Amino acid sequence: MKHVWKYLIPLPCLAALIAMVPQTPQDREDPAVADVGVVARMSELQYVDTHGKTQVVSARNVLEIRLLEDHPNAIRLELVYENGDYSLIDATAFHILRVGRDETDVRLVRSRIARTKFPRLK
């Protein structure tokens, strides 16, 4: 019996050492890199494309507009629609109009190109 205690005492210490081993985090995303977003009520998005023409997109079916801020040449906008459609737009300027017909809540997000919401193709 004296010899058995000699072997049983190190077991709790070994278990404590195993419990203190660093685990891989569930979410590997750095909180400092997280997207900044706000929900705004709007009626349409107007943008000037790279050819200088003004285009209008009704906000009626748009869920989210993402401004990808690390694009080198122009403003890159990513639009995600309710039905799963997707648009990626290079623009020189854009305008968010809040008053008009068919006002709806749209999430506006500042993000980076590496974090695009391009739909996964099956």
Image (cartoon, rainbow, N blue to C red):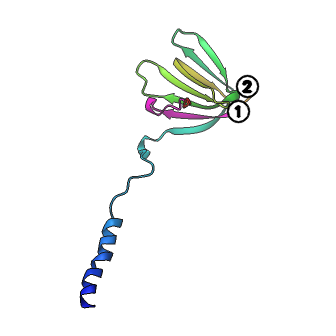
Mark 2 closeness class: few <14, some 14–19, many ≥20 residues within 10 Å = few
State the residue in front, 66 or 86.
Answer: 86
Which percent across, then down, holds residue 11? 31, 76
Q: Position of residue 23 (x, y in %)?
A: 37, 57
Q: Is residue 113 magenta?
A: yes
**Residue 65 image-quadrant placement:** top right
Of badges 2 and 1, the one in the foreground is: 1
Residue at the (70%, 33%) spot, across then down: 104
Q: Quadrant of the C terminus?
A: top right
Asked if residue 24 lies in the magenta stretch, the reply is: no
Q: Nearer the viewer, residue 13 or 43?
A: 13
Helix, strand or loop at disc 2?
loop
Label 1 CA crowd tier, 10 Å (few <14, some 14–19, many 20+): some
- Whole-percent x, y for residue 51 in the image: 53, 8
Q: Nearer the viewer, residue 26 or 4?
A: 4
Q: Which residue is mark 2?
A: 100
Q: Residue at x 43, y 46 (%)?
A: 31
CA distance for labels 2 and 1: 10 Å
The residue at which mark 1 appears reads as 104
The boundaries of the magenta stretch are 104-118
Amino acid carrying label 1: it is Thr
Q: Tally the marks.
A: 2
Image location (x, y in percent) of residue 66: 54, 30
Q: Is residue 66 above or below residue 2?
A: above
